[in-house]
Amino acid sequence: MAGPVMTETSGKVVIRNVGLMLSGDIDAPILDADTVVVQDGVIASVGREKDCDTGDPRRLIDCRGSTLGPGLIDSHVHPVFGDWTPRQNQLGWIESCMHGGVTTMISAGEVHLPGRPKDVIGVKALAITAQRAFDGMRAAGVGGGVKVLAGAPVIEQGMTEQDFADLAAAGVRLLGEIGLGSVKAGDEAAKMVGWARKYGIQSTIHTGGPSIPGSGLIDEHVVLEADADVIGHVNGGHTSLSYKSVCTLCEKSSRALEIVHNGNERIAILTAKHAMELKCPHRVILGTDAPAGSGVQPLGILRLIALISSLADIPAEIVFGFATGNIARMRGLSQGLIEPGRPADFVFMDKAQHSAGRDILDSVRLGDIPGVGMVMIDGIVRCQRSRNTPPAVEVPVIVA
């Protein structure tokens, strides 16, 4: 059932009694603040309650000492149409991921569409249709109101610069994974990446072994030559390159290093560690690469955060930033950080009941995923206690 129409505005929302506020910025991951004021879906102020204008809110939320963070961003999904995936014939997967704290998803190509067109006209038509459809879907409140940034064409041989100009003029801002179509050579991909970049379209390249029929191995040499903006699933989707090859990508490229849930977990951990050693943690972003053959993981981003923090020994507040502020900056998004002027997309969390951790950050460092108590998109509450996460110790309450 569709939720409230997303053309409604939140009015003034006051969020108080925040126990821990995560900024999304890995340079300053924890904010000295306990209150956020939202006006019409945009963060108006962040600070201590005594310093904020909290009078006469339309909605007042008491966090009861729980944690507030930016809504999680999934940098790598494969939607088709609506809140349904033909890959697994599953309904409601987007809304279910919202119960895992995800408020934004970024398409890496609508590749699972049955009979996906591969001629140039069809490629362009599908991308434009998907971009329009997912924008309209959110406006109708379908999918829990999650912001699905879709319309990511899988480039094919025969495309010209004019095709990229046409796509950009129609509002397309993403390319699907390079390598899932007929363009697989580094020099050919580099030419099209250059055209895309010229017209403001961001590119992602498949990395590793083949994932679907028609795809193929994309090794480190092709990735470096293509020079796409995002090194998609650097830990494989599902089959990874060797760790030596991944180190080469970390060291010889300056592009985003995307670690996904549906990849090689050992390489995920080693990549995160290597990025920290190279002092380039700002390049690390997270995604699920779902829906895929292994299914849909509504808690995939939270699980990946816990995996990397616990096994790569990286502070949890930093890893939360990999899934929020890092993606915002790499992808040119306004959401993903808690600061005035940004969209009011939030996840409210606490440590899971009976976790051995002292608090939420310690529990994630120990490998436990937190409990989600509420999700807000553009200042509107989209769910309260998550039906998918373990129950949180404390959950926020809507006072008014």
Image: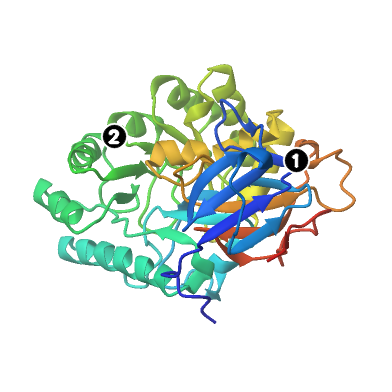
Task: Return the residue nearer the eye: 23 or 230.
Answer: 23
Q: Residue furthest bottom?
A: 1
In the displayed structure, 101 sits above or below 49; it is: below
Q: Position of residue 386 (x, y in %)?
A: 70, 63
Residue 375, quarter of the rendered image: bottom right
Real-space Cα distance between discs 1 and 2? 36 Å
Specify the quadrant that holds the N terminus.
Answer: bottom right
Specify the quadrant that holds the C terminus.
Answer: bottom right
Q: Position of residue 173 (x, y in %)?
A: 28, 50
The secondary element bearing badge 2 is classed as helix
Label 1 Cα crowd, 10 Å radius (few <14 / some 14-19 / many 20+): many
- Which residue is pictured at 31% across the width and 32% down the height? 227
Looking at numbered disc 1 in the image, what kind of residue is underneath it? Val
Would residue 281 be seen by someone viewing this image from the given angle? yes
In the displayed structure, 93 sits above or below 239; it is: below
Label 2 Cα crowd, 10 Å radius (few <14 / some 14-19 / many 20+): many
Q: From the viewer's perspective, is 63 left or right of 132?
A: right
How is the model colour-coded?
Answer: rainbow
- Which residue is pictured at 64% across the width and 36% down the height? 266
- Which residue is pictured at 39% across the width and 52% down the height? 108
Q: Which disc is residue 216 wearing?
A: none
Q: Position of residue 328 (x, y in %)?
A: 45, 41
In the displayed structure, 148 sits above or below 162; it is: below
- Which one is earlier in the sequence, the residue at label 1 or at label 2? 2
Residue 213, quarter of the rendered image: bottom left
Q: Which residue is mark 1?
A: 364
Q: From the viewer's perspective, is 139 left or right of 170?
A: right
Looking at numbered disc 2 in the image, what kind of residue is underneath it? Ala
Q: Which residue is mark 2?
A: 226
In the displayed structure, 270 sits above or below 240; it is: above
The secondary element bearing badge 1 is classed as helix
